Image (cartoon, coloured by chain):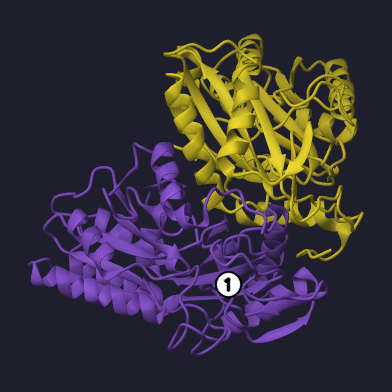
Chain colours: A yellow, B purple
Amino acid sequence: MKKLINNPEHVVEEMLEGMVAAFPGYVRKLEGFNVIVRADAPIKGKVGLVSGGGSGHEPSHAGFVGKGMLDAGVAGAVFTSPTPDQIFEAVKAVDGGAGVLLIIKNYTGDVMNFEMAGEMAEMEGIKVAKVVVNDDVAVENSTYTTGRRGIAGTVFVHKIAGAKAQAGGTLEEVKTVAEKVIANVRSMGMALTPCVVPAAGKPTFTLAEDEMEIGMGIHGEPGTMRTKIMKADEIVEHLMSKILTDLPYKPGDEVAVMINGLGATPIMEQFIMNNKVNKILKEKGIKVHRTYIGEYMTSLEMAGASITLLKLDEELKNLLDAPADTPAFRQF
Amino acid sequence: MKKLINNPEHVVEEMLEGMVAAFPGYVRKLEGFNVIVRADAPIKGKVGLVSGGGSGHEPSHAGFVGKGMLDAGVAGAVFTSPTPDQIFEAVKAVDGGAGVLLIIKNYTGDVMNFEMAGEMAEMEGIKVAKVVVNDDVAVENSTYTTGRRGIAGTVFVHKIAGAKAQAGGTLEEVKTVAEKVIANVRSMGMALTPCVVPAAGKPTFTLAEDEMEIGMGIHGEPGTMRTKIMKADEIVEHLMSKILTDLPYKPGDEVAVMINGLGATPIMEQFIMNNKVNKILKEKGIKVHRTYIGEYMTSLEMAGASITLLKLDEELKNLLDAPADTPAFRQF
C-alpha cells in the first residue's frame, strides 16, 4: 500500500482538520464529530442541506460545503456510512428554522442511517425532508445497494438544490427541485485499476494489466463487464449508449456534462473523454449547456472515470448557472 | 500501460479539443497549432501573458487561461518543449498592443524555445519580456535543467502577474511583479510512483513497492533521496525544512500555501499533508493567508505531491486575492 498517510485509523479526522486549516473562511468542523459545516451555519431562514457518506470520495461531500451548495458534509469512515448520531449533529448545526434536506446516495447503510437521523431531528422539532440519488445506470441492485447506486450525479443535486435554498426556496420547493434533478440525471463509470482502503491495506478488487471494468461502483462493487482495455472513444461510446438510452432524448435537448475522474486519472485523459462525449452529443443534436471536468466524486486512488449527463429545462439551467463558492466547486 | 486514450500520438490534440469543447466561453484553440488562448484574445491595451511547456502537467498551462491569469497556454508534446513557432503564434494571438510576458519554467528546451519565439515576435514589432521560474529547491541542475527546476510555484506567477496585467499594469510592471513572485516562491515534491509517457508506454523510472523518491522532478527527473515510504507527517517535515530554510522567515510573516497533487494522489492525502504543513507554520509563527489544494501542475498519473510556499507582502497579497476565472482556477 503506497499512501501519504500517518495512521490508517486517523485518516478521516486528519483529512478534515487539514481541510478546515485550508479553508477556514468556508468551513468549520463540529467539535467531536467528523462533520464539516459552513463557517456561517446555521443561516436563519435558509433551508439547510446535509449530505455525506463514507469517506474516500473526496471532494465529496465536505468539499461542496459553502455558499450555493451544501450546509454540511458528514464523513463516515472510509467507504462506511456515517452514523445516525453524526448526521443528527449535522442537522442540528445547520437548521436555521426553515428545515433541512438530507441528500442521500442510494446505499443501504446511508439510507438507513440518514433516515434514523432524520427521525431523531424531527423528534426535536426540526423539519426534515430527504431525497435519495440513484443515478448510476450500470446495475440494478449491487453489493451495498437495493436499486441503483448513487454516484457523481449527486453533485448536480447538491448544486441545484443548493441554489434553490440559497435563493430562499422552502423545504418543499428545495426537495421538489432535488427530485427533478434525480429524475433527469444519469451516470456510468469504468475503472482501469482498483483502490486500496487504508485500513484494509489491499486492493478492493483485482484487474489484470490488460483489463478494465465497466460499470463498477465507487467502492469497487462489481460492474457490468470486465474486458480488455479499449480505446477511450470506444469506452465513451459504451457508457454514453447506456446513459442516453435510459431517458428519452431528442434533438434540441440540453444537458450538463460531468466527466468525473475517480482519483488517479490524468486530467489529460478526462479531456480526451470529453472530446468524444461532445462528438456523440453533437451527432444527436443535443446541446451542451455546461461541462464540468475533474474530480468530483472519487474512489481514493482508483484510475477510471464516470460520465454524467443531466437533462436540463429552464428551471434547472438557471439554478445550475447560479454562483457557488465552496472549497471544491466555484462558479461565478 | 493503462490509459484512457485512443492513440499515443494524438493525445495532446484530442485533449485540447476536449478542453475547448468543455469551456468554449473561456478558451479557443489556434487553428493548426496546439495553443489555447482566451476566447476574447487579444485584449486591446492589456499585457498578454503566455506560458506553456510540455504536455502531461495538466491543468498547467492551458487550464489557467482566462480572466485574471494567462492569455495563452502553449502545449508541447508530452514532456517535450513546445516549438518556437507555436510559441510565436501564441504571442501574436494575444498581443493587444501593450506587449507580452513569457512565463517560462526553467528547463533548457523551454528557455531556448521561448527565447527564440520572443526574438521572432520582436522582429515583428511586438514588445516581449520574459521571466524564468525556478522554484524547486530540491536540486541544482538536473536532467533537463541548468539551475533549479520550475514546478508548481509557477502557478502563483500566473496568478499574480495575471492579476497585475488584468488591473492595467504595463509590461515592465507585470514583469517586475512576476520576478517578485519568483524571488519569494519555493517548492519541493516527492513521488510514490512514476508516470508513463503515452508514446513510451513504460514508466519514467521505477520504485519498489516500499520505496518513495524525495525531490524528483515533474518529468521523473532524479530527486535528492530514495528511501522507504515514510509517514505523511515525516515527509512533510522533510519537504518543509528544505523549503523554509531557503528563504529567511520570521514570526509574523505571511504565506500562501499550495499542496499540489501530481496526478494519482487522493485528495484525502493532500488534506492530510496540509494538516501537517499548517502545524509546522503555526509553530514558527508564520501566518497562512490562503491555501490551494488540488492538482495544479501534475505529472500524468504520478502518485505524489509537492508543497509550495509563497512569501507574501501587501502587494502580492492584494494581487493573489484578486478574482480569477479560468477553467482550472476560479476565485471570487
Q: Is residue A326 visible?
A: no
In which image quadrant can residue A62 be found? Answer: top right
Decide if residue A188 is on the left or right side of residue B167. Answer: right
Image quadrant occupied by the N terminus of chain B? bottom right
Sort mark 1 into few (<14), some (14-19) or many (20+) by Cα contacts within 10 Å: some
Q: Residue at x 61, y 40 (%)?
A: A260
Q: Position of residue B16 (x, y in %)?
A: 41, 48
Residue type beneath disc 1: Ile
Residue A145 shows up from this direction:
yes
| Residue A149 at x, y percent in the picture | 78, 26
> Circle 1 sits in a helix, a strand or a loop, which is it?
loop
Q: Indicate left or right for B11 with A188 as reference.
A: left
Q: Is residue A105 above or below residue A213?
A: above
Point 47% across, 57% down: residue: B9
Residue A4, horizontal then vertical, whole percent: 75, 65
Camera-side residue of B102 and A16 = B102
Q: How many marks?
A: 1
Which quarter of the rendered picture does the C terminus of chain B lie within?
top left
Q: Residue at x 65, y 78 (%)?
A: B239
Q: Nearer the viewer, residue B286 or A9?
A: A9
Which residue position is annotated with label 1? B286
Task: Please tell me in which quadrant of the rendered image residue B26 appears.
Answer: top left
